[in-house]
Amino acid sequence: MMIYTVTLNPSVDYIVEVEEFTLGGLNRMKRDMKLPGGKGINVSRVLKQLGVENTATGFLGGFTGEYIEQWLRQEMIASDFVHIADDTRINIKLKAGEETEINGAGPEISQPETASLLHKLDALKQGDVVILSGSTPPSLGGDFYSRLIAVCKQKGAEFVIDTTGQALKDALPMGPLLVKPNHHELAELFGAQISTRAEIITYGRKLLDAGARHVLVSMAGEGALFISEQGVYHAGAPAGQVKNSVGAGDSMIAGFVGTLSLTGDVLEAFRAGVASGSATAFSDDLADRQKIEQLRPLVVISQL
């Protein structure tokens, strides 16, 4: 079996730190970093750290797209992107005490480019897993994930979806292997106020009823809940200094899906998911294998 990650709207994340930011004045950087961004790309990078082979696909274009491909090659991650005419976007994360984000809208993607990606998914086989993550460039239309899921179903492949709003609602009846909203996204999905763990479980179960096979709900410092047919489980978040919230959810998906593919054990997958998410939260970039293995035994799971 092969795991594929699909990133429709990747980015180069340009992280800039300044002592103090003066609007309208000249600001000098204290330090900067350029990292490949995009939720599926994050999942691919953490899967690789876990020793799980995978292929990253989606749309890349221009010098920014080349930068991402080069980075994946360096980390020895297989990639099979559709090369588009427009440039992959740049997202700016400005850190001056607090963090300000300026995100690019994303490239225009043409009909032939769109058809190329659907054609790539024709290679899917029974038992493969496709992880669909993040936002869709506006030019693809709101139903593009549904079109990708239809190809997965036709080929007998499993799919995981990590997005929000209508695209997630539309995917649920198709039976995703995993969905992973945080507690805010869960509340938003049902237009509800969620303030207690019991309410999270109630709404998490609604995702199961709607068609999801496994539900992970991340609750920041409160750890995470895992809801499936076999029961409801809680894992506490290991203690550590949070440096980075970007990519923690993607790392959690990588830990869960990667470990499930290696072991077939959903609770071990849950443990690895929480360890991987925490390891990224405690790092400047994404989690590395050493950090994940260090945290794995510290994740205590209890059945509720």
Image: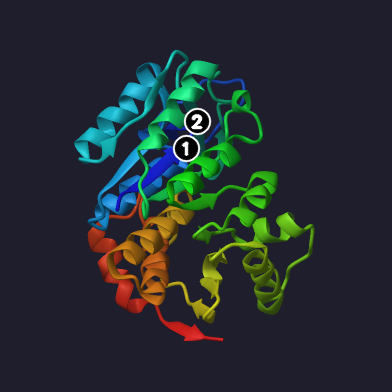
Q: Amino acid at mark 2?
A: Asn
Q: Quadrant of residue 172?
A: bottom right
Q: Position of residue 246 (x, y in %)?
A: 47, 48
Of pointers 2 and 1, the one earlier in the residue sequence: 1
Q: Position of residue 295 (x, y in %)?
A: 32, 70
Question: Is residue 73 shown above or below 201?
Answer: above
What residue sits right under mark 2 in the picture?
91
Tag 2–tag 1 contact (CB < 8 Å): no
Q: Position of residue 187 (x, y in %)?
A: 72, 60
Q: Amino acid at mark 1?
A: Glu
Residue 132: in sight, yes or no?
no
Q: Which mark is residue 19?
A: 1
Q: Around disc 2, counting alpha carbons within 10 Å, would you say few (fewer than 14), some (14 to 19), or many (20 or more)?
A: many
Q: Quadrant of residue 5?
A: top left
Q: Position of residue 286 (x, y in %)?
A: 35, 50
Residue at the image position 37 percent from the left and 55 percent from the top: 127
Question: Is residue 73 shown above or below 269?
Answer: above
- Judge by depth and name the residue closer to the eye, 146 or 227: 146
Q: Secondary structure at mark 1?
A: loop
Q: Which mark is residue 261?
A: none
- Judge by depth and name the residue closer to the eye, 3 or 249: 3
- Quadrant in which the C terminus is drawn: bottom right
Residue 246: in sight, yes or no?
yes
